[in-house]
């Protein structure tokens, strides 16, 4: 029985995994012509109209977001519940959220990957211990990496346990109020007025990083949307189906873009096989090349202004890095964690290739069938 189950599992993984390997491949580089760009038009991409008034201009401005009538929102045929928002941030405001991700959110009591093998005093202030090294990197790329450059993930609110694949009432810190309000603004704008931000995972990618094939299924509430925010360099994002037998649709995600996975799309397999320099050349995407927003916003903003000194460090970090924030609701409305119940979700399909951050090179070859599956998937969306 075990061998039969393993055989079925291996066959079911093939379609998604081959596309993943196709785009992770570096030599020869894959053809990117089939990667979907939402703003360039595609038969499967459908513009979505938001309900004007769902988010007031006042609340949007406080979070650094454009008025709702200026948002560009898209759905994707074959993926009900999936929404893509093309950079709704006001000019100069992505800088503030980048600063929060690098300077504020890695601070204690939040948890990061460095805590696993370093003393608490060594990770007490990752920003302060790293900023001068990052400034020096501008003139010496061979200098030793800072702690900030070694950061891979940070957890917020209910802290996700990577070993047990669960959340716990005993492993919790206050969710950042500014990120909570940003998330509520985006969720309200997209029609999810009851969404409660309770847990966050921040991923820090470099140009050789990737995110393995997985499903976000550890939350007790699997009906509320999952929000994903992107800053810095671009990536290829793969969105699949309820099983790995379905080849995923590849799409580009650029700085400032937001994805919402809700309804039937909430439990779909997804992955990030490749981080790419933003299109157009230059060290930073256009939305990050200007100065940070000024320090006299009206109405008062959710976050502190990003000083030019702080942005010098952030910009140096982002020259070859990408930051992604995912925010999710853990508990159903009015519910709490079950008493005495083991909430682990067994990951029988997990392999080394499914680890959260991957840096090992792909084995050349075995990509031709992946390209065929990719073409077939694009034609069906």
Image (cartoon, rainbow, N blue to C red):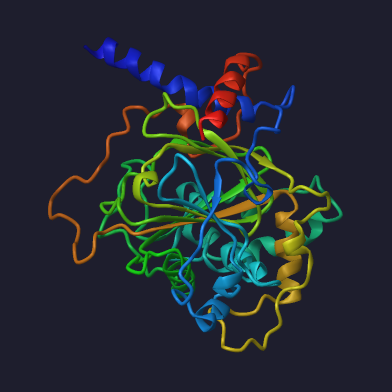
Q: Quadrant of the N terminus?
A: top left
Q: Nearer the viewer, residue 178 or 134?
A: 178
Give me the residue at 83% from left, 53% from top. Answer: 282
Give me the residue at 41% from left, 34% from top. Answer: 241
Q: Nearer the viewer, residue 284 or 14?
A: 14
Q: Quadrant of residue 101?
A: bottom right
Reply above or below: 5 against 265. above
Residue 141 picture location, percent across and down: 81, 48
Q: Nearer the viewer, residue 258 or 141?
A: 258
Q: Quadrant of residue 312?
A: bottom right
Quick check: can you spot residue 320?
yes
Reply above or below: 189 against 246. below
Q: Quadrant of residue 187?
A: bottom left
Residue 285 picture location, percent across and down: 75, 56
Residue 48 picture location, percent across and down: 51, 57
Which residue sits furthest front?
43
Query: Position of 26 compared to 47: left or right?
Result: right
Query: Position of 282 compared to 150: left or right?
Result: right
Query: Position of 171 compared to 24: left or right?
Result: left
Query: Position of 132 compared to 258: left or right?
Result: right
């Amino acid at each position: 029985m075990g061998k039969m189950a393993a055989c079925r599992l291996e066959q079911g993984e093939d379609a998604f995994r081959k596309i993943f390997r196709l785009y992770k491949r570096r030599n020869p580089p894959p053809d990117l012509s089939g990667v979907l760009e939402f703003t360039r038009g595609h038969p499967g991409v459908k513009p979505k109209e938001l309900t004007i008034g769902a988010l007031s201009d006042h609340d949007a401005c406080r979070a650094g977001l454009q008025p709702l009538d200026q948002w560009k929102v898209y759905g994707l045929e074959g993926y009900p519940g999936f929404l893509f928002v093309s950079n709704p941030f006001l000019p100069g405001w992505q800088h503030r959220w980048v600063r929060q991700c690098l300077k504020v959110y890695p601070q204690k009591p939040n948890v990061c990957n460095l805590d696993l093998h370093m003393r608490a005093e060594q990770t007490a202030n990752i920003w302060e211990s790293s900023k001068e090294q990052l400034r020096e990197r501008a003139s010496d790329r061979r200098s030793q990496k800072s702690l900030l450059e070694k950061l891979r993930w940070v957890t917020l609110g209910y802290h996700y346990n990577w070993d047990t694949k669960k959340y716990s009432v005993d492993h919790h810190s206050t969710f950042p109020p500014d990120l909570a309000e940003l998330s509520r603004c985006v969720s309200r704008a997209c029609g999810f007025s009851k969404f409660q931000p309770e847990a966050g995972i921040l991923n820090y990618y470099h140009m050789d990083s990737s995110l393995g094939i997985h499903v976000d299924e550890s939350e007790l509430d699997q009906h509320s949307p999952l929000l994903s925010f992107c800053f810095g360099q671009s990536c290829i994002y793969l969105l699949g189906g309820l099983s790995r037998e379905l080849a995923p649709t590849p799409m580009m995600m650029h700085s400032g873009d937001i994805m919402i996975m809700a309804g039937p799309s909430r439990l779909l397999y997804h992955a990030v096989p490749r981080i790419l320099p933003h299109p157009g050349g230059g060290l930073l995407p256009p939305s990050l090349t200007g100065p940070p927003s000024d320090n006299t916003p009206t109405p008062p903003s959710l976050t502190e202004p990003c000083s030019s000194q702080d942005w010098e460090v952030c910009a140096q970090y982002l020259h070859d890095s990408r930051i992604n924030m995912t925010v999710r609701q853990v508990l159903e409305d009015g519910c709490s964690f079950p008493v005495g119940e083991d909430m682990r979700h067994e990951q029988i399909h997990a392999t080394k290739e499914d680890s959260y951050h991957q840096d090992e090179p792909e084995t050349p070859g075995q990509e031709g069938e992946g390209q065929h599956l990719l073409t077939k998937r694009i034609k069906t969306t």
